[in-house]
Image: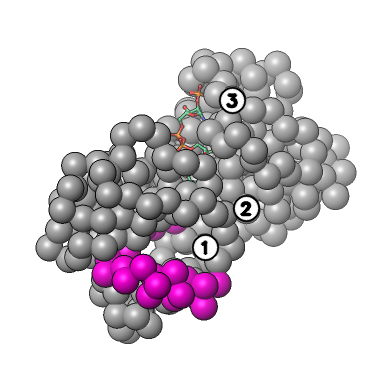
Amino acid sequence: MRVLLLGGTADARRLAGLLVHEGHHVVSSLAGRTREPLLPAGEVRIGGFGGVEGLIAYLRGERIDVLVDATHPFAATMSEHAAVACAGLGVPRMVVDRPGWTASPGDVWHRVASLGEAAAVIPRLGRRVFLTTGRQGIAAFAELDECWFLARSVEPPDAVAPKRLDVVLDRGPFTVDGERRLMAGHRIDVLVTKDSGGPDAKLVAARELGIPVVMVNRPPAPPLGPLDRVAGVHAVTRAIAEAETRHP
Ligand code: NAP
């Protein structure tokens, strides 16, 4: 099967490895936001397609049998383009399931709809803020002069950033112990995160330390068409193997 795998996540890298191992022709697509991305197995292409039209041309030109959307849950534009392009061409789309987080006893979470809303609630929750919203999310907090920020990202933030900002350049996975040390060591009193799902060490550490969390809700996912399905990493590999058996 000729698979276009929209990536930029650890799940996508794992899936690329599994699919290549099973003998599929896999092209992983990365947006190109990171200068030194972790590269998956198989072929890799980097950079936007040029909107829906560009993606349609790519799917046609490369004779793609199935598109797998393993992008981050907040990559809403890419997912929307993939849904429209696949529906238009009749190419099946598999969306890698990544459930959001749910609060446990002891958690103090404030759910908000956007990074802008997160910036608006922070001043009444704390003054020493741990930002884990990614490099592109840091600009939303640039006006909060009354707060000090510790931002963690893979690459340094853009020019628009809060005045009082320290940056820790790091890439997960992180441990609960490490997160507890980092937050306690910097006397963090509020954590800001997107509801990305996946490993939750920072949330466990925040719960243990009694630190409130501002949780940015996910954007809505595009609706599923008749050829589409949502599945976990292993179910995606099984479904692609089954599709190949039906259409060798
Ligand atoms: P986005 O806002 O949904 O997409 C904006 C544009 O970037 C898309 O229209 C597309 O350009 C291009 N693009 C995005 N993902 C692409 C991909 N995998 N391959 C080729 N082009 C892509 O995306 P984003 O939120 O900036 O995320 C960019 C990438 O970073 C994604 O691959 C995502 O999985 C990864 N990521 C995002 C986050 C996050 O919080 N948003 C976190 C971790 C990783 P064209 O219209 O020109 O095709």
Residue type at the position of mark 2 = Ala
Query: Residue 186 in the image: x percent, y percent?
Result: 36, 68
Q: Is residue 102 visible?
A: no
**Label 2, on which residue?**
10
**Where is the N terminus found, in terms of image quarters?**
top right
Q: Where 230 sits versus 226, above or below?
A: below
Span colored in magenta: 175-196
Looking at the rendered structure, which numbered label has been put on residue 47? 3
Is label 3 in contact with label 2 (beta carbons under 8 Å)?
no
| Mark 3 beta carbon near ligand 1 (under 8 Å) | yes
Q: Where 51 sits versus 108, above or below?
A: above
**Label 1, on which residue?**
198
Mark pair 2, 1: CA separation: 10 Å
Q: Is residue 206 visible?
A: yes
Q: Residue at x 19, y 65 (%)?
A: 126
Query: Residue 124 in the image: x percent, y percent?
Result: 12, 63
Q: Residue at x 31, y 40 (%)?
A: 161
